[in-house]
Every structure is written in structure tokens, then in C-alpha cells.
Image (cartoon, rainbow, N blue to C red):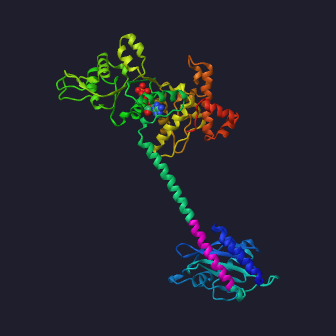
Amino acid sequence: MHDPLSVAEELIELTTTLATERRLEALLGAVVNSARRLTRAEGGRVLVLDRTGRHLHGLVGQNDVAPDAAALPGEIPVYAEGNAFNLRDANVFAAVTGKIVNLADVYDYSGFDFVRLREQDERTGYRTRSFVVAPLWNVEGVTLGVLQLINVQLTPGGEIGALPKAFERVVGSFAAHAAVAIANARLFEENRELIRQLDRRNADLARENSRLKVMAIPQEEQVVGESPAFRAALDLARRAASSSVAVLMLGETGTGKDVFANAVHRLGKRRDRPFVAQNCAALPETLLESELFGHRKGAFSGALADKKGLVHEANGGTLFLDEIGDMPLPLQAKILRLLEEGSVRRLGDTRLEKVDVRIIAATNLDLPQKIAQGSFREDLYYRLSVFPVTIPPLRERPSDIPLLIDFFLRRIAQVHGREGFSLTPRALDALCRWRYPGNVRELKNMAERAALLIDGDERIDLKHLPAHLAKAAPDIIVQTPAAEGGTSLRSAVRQYEAIVIENRLREAGWNQSRAARLLQISRRSLVEKLQRYAIRTP
Ligand SMILES: Nc1ncnc2c1ncn2[C@@H]1O[C@H](COP(=O)(O)OP(=O)(O)OP(=O)(O)O)[C@@H](O)[C@H]1O
């Protein structure tokens, strides 16, 4: 056995380890190791009680002489039949009574049952002789488990025997220290797990919160686009929003004229008043007139009572006249009066009524051409086009395509209750190259269709996109803006460059160094290009 000085040294070292080690497994390893060094035991184990206190489980096993013999026993039941303690087991005895079991040879009769241990010896060829079990009782007298020491060597020559009586107390107090440290480490791990759970919960809540926030904003109110051309149009719309000036939204079908009209209303002083929209191409003349300006009872067959028009509903707010190019000429005159005098006359009425309505109109038609044909009033055109906002077609702002794809897929994922959708690079490439005659609406429809076609966690691939798009995908020349009549080669190349850069950035998770490597250009040159094309991390 050790001399008192080395025992003291061992205890000091152990106390330090116990005080500093917070990871349960490492701590248990250190406990068994130190206890073995202290007692010169060949092997040692820690068994702990499960949460229900019904079983002891091995957690750590060590054996210098035969690593196989370090194997941990299976579950040891604390209770025998009839709910009495299973005191025939030396581990349970120590755990329950708080006494140290200290045997010179487990093969000699001791009253304890060592059948399993002997079976293990047979399997491993190891011979277990002396066997010490110290209870791991913490200060409150709560049993955590036991510390086993196997084959205690009494002399440096390797003579094996029971632990000398004087050492029992040392081992006992050592085990008590270890128990406190183990209890602390368990608490620490439990706390850490609780913190982890809380963090996870917080992150879930934050995600849910931002999801709800996004959901709370109606889709038509979100305006997505970062390209300089788009930003310029949006900037104009913002400026218009601050006054009550009439605005004319121009742009091809599906470019987002409705979205912009809504934004102008929402960003202006009238945001708390109604935003009322009417498609002027959707109704025949009389019905449209009655819808917009209202009617008096008997104004036409079917006019059974007085009815207010949308202009009345929009009073104080905004009236959005979509497809104004298709408005019949007589109604154009009424709109002009509304713009110039702020007054309207209901169908079948003689009186004029004052209303305070801001007009935003939109068309994808060539109004000067319609004026030339005599189907649009020139004076109305000039009145409306005081503040024109032209939304560029999507093919002229390709760097917005990935942003819009991302936006629509995220929205769709929310509706489907999914985390998200991902695209294969070739699907993204095909989407980015397409010319979108139907503009953003077409892109949105494609995203919705693809989301419906994929199975489970599948990525959106070419086969989920319309055939014409997949077919055209490899043909860069046809599909890039270079094919656009009137677009210079230089501007087409720049647009394509912007698409490629943005795609690579996406692949690289918006890590600029990684994207630069993928593009095989320097990071500095990438940064310059990002500035030039106004590409920003979303
Ligand atoms: N910049 C954008 N950000 C988000 N969604 C957009 C954007 N532009 C268009 N959309 C969406 O695309 C679809 C078509 O847009 P919108 O109806 O505003 O186009 P439009 O120009 O008014 O079309 P039309 O001329 O056919 O009436 C809508 O679902 C709209 O929400």
C-alpha cells in the first residue's frame, strides 16, 4: 500500500480534479483512476442508480491487467422478489446500507452472490480476487451508486488481498467526495441540457415569430427586388407615396403593378384608409360605371336601390384602376372629372358629390398608341402621367430572379408547413436564364407548380419545371438577354455575369471567399462586381 504522504498527494490531486471536471464521463473516469492509484487496484468501476432507483448501471470500467475484465455488468436490480432489497448483491448492499464491502477473495464464501462475476471471469480468463465496494453517498445521504475496486495489491510485488482496515476510511471519504462531485456534474449536465432545450425552444419561437410576422404581411404587400432598375422604380413609387398625386404604373403584364400600387398606398398618409381596386377590363361599361360611381334607384333595370360606388368606399383612401387602357371613353371622362374636381355623379343622378380619392392607375398597354387610335383620352393621359412609374420586365433585371425564387419558395413552404424547398443548381440555372414573358407572375406560378410536383424532401429539379424551360436551359445564347433585340452585347454580358455571380454566392451560402473560389476570381474582384451589380446578401 502507499505511504501516507503519497496518499495525501493522491487525495489532493483528486480533489483538484473533482473540483474542476464538469463533464460527467470524464469525472467518473478520473474518480475510478484515482481510487485505483490510491489503493493499487487492478480494476475499478462506477455503477450508478437509475432515476427510478430500481437498478444499478455500470458507467465506467477500467482494468490494467485485462481490458476485457473492465466490462460493465448488466443492469443490477436493487429489489429482489417481494420488494425486499437485493442484499445478496454486494453492490446493492453497499448502495443501500452505506457500508463498505471489503472482501479478500470473492470465491470464498461471503454470503454475497458473485455468480455473474465468476461467469465473467470464465469468459475473460481474468481472476477476480479481492473486491471492494464503496457507496457513493452524497452529503444529504442520498445514494448515487457505488465505486468498485478489484484486486487490491497489498505489496509492490503484487500480493492481492482485502483493503487494509485503515484504508477503508480513506476510500470511504474519497467516495463521499466523489459522490458530491458526481452529483454536481450531473446537475451541471442537466442544466446544460435544460439550457440547450431552452435555446432550441427560443430559436423555434424566434423562427415561429418571424414566420408569423411574414404571414401577417399579406403577400401582395411584400415587394421583392434588389436590382438597380427595380430599386429605381421602387424609389420613384416611394416618392409618390408621400403626396396624393395620381400615379400611373406602367409595365408588362405580371411585373408587379398591383404590388407597387399597394405599396404606394401603404407608404403614404392614406395607409389607414381604404385601398380599393377595380380591374377596368373586367366589366361591361354600365356595370363598371355603376361599380365605380354607384347608382340611384331605378337608374337601370335591376337598380332596385341606391348604391354607393367604389369611389365612395375609397373616400379618404386610394382607388386603384387596373387596366385603365381598357376603360371605355365615357368613363374616362368621369375619371378626369374626379381627378380635376374631386367630384363624381352616380348613375341616374343629377347631383355631383365631393370625394377625396387618390387615383393610382395601371396599364400594360401603349397609351400614346391608344390615343392615336382614338380609344384613350389625351387629357386623361396627361393628367395621369404626371407621375409615371415604369416597372422593368423581369428579363431586364435578372439579378432579382433568384431573390424572387427564394421569396416565393419560402412563402409556399410556410403554406405547406415545411422548412423550405431547395433547388438543384441546374434548376436554378434554368430559372435564372428564362426570359419570363409573363414576368414575376410566371415565375411565381412556376415555383408553385414545382412545389406541388416534388415528392417529400426531393429537390426541385428540371423535371419539375415547365418543359419549355427545361428544354431551353442549356441554350445560353437563346435565353440570355443577349438575344433581346435592342439590348447591347455588353449589357447582356453584364446581366449574365450578375446571374452567374449570384448563383455561385448562393451555392457558397453567401460566403464571398468561397464564391470567389468557385468563380475562380479574386475576392477583391468579386467585391467590385457585387458593388457594380448592386448584389447584396439577402
Ligand atoms: N416585386 C415583387 N415582389 C413580390 N411579389 C411580386 C413582385 N412583383 C410581382 N409579384 C407577384 O407577382 C404576381 C403578379 O403581380 P401583379 O399582379 O402586381 O402584376 P401586374 O403587373 O399588376 O400584372 P397585370 O398587368 O397582369 O395586372 C402577384 O402574385 C404579385 O404578388
Q: Is residue 446 left or right of residue 281?
A: right
Q: Which residues are magenta?
A: 169-190
Q: Is residue 425 left or right of residue 436?
A: right
- Helix, strand or loop: magenta stretch: helix
Q: Is residue 286 left or right of residue 167?
A: left
- What residue is at 60 percent from the left and 23 percent from the top? 492
The answer to whether 69 is drawn above or below residue 84 in the figure is above
Question: Which percent across, then down, holds residue 173?
Answer: 65, 82
Q: Quadrant of residue 139?
A: bottom right
- What residue is at 32 percent from the left and 22 percent from the top? 339
Of all residues shown, which one is farthest toward the front? 243
Find out whether residue 127 is within the magenta segment.
Answer: no
Quadrant location, ligand no. 1: top left
The answer to whether 195 is drawn above or below residue 320 in the figure is below
Q: Is residue 333 visible?
A: yes
The answer to whether 215 is drawn above or below residue 277 in the figure is below
Q: Quadrant of residue 284?
A: top left
Question: Which percent across, then down, holds residue 234?
Answer: 47, 29
Question: Which percent across, then down, holds residue 238?
Answer: 45, 30
Question: Which percent across, then down, holds residue 509?
Answer: 61, 41
Q: Of residues 14 and 448, which is closer to you in this image? A: 14
Q: Quadrant of residue 349?
A: top left
Find out whether residue 181 is within the magenta segment.
Answer: yes
Placement of the C terminus among the 4 image quadrants: top right
Placement of the N terminus among the 4 image quadrants: bottom right
Q: Is residue 412 left or right of residue 482?
A: left
Of all residues shown, which one is farthest toward the right? 157
Q: How many marks?
A: 0
The answer to whether 276 is drawn above or below residue 382 in the figure is below
Q: Is residue 71 visible?
A: no
- What residue is at 38 percent from the left and 24 percent from the top? 246
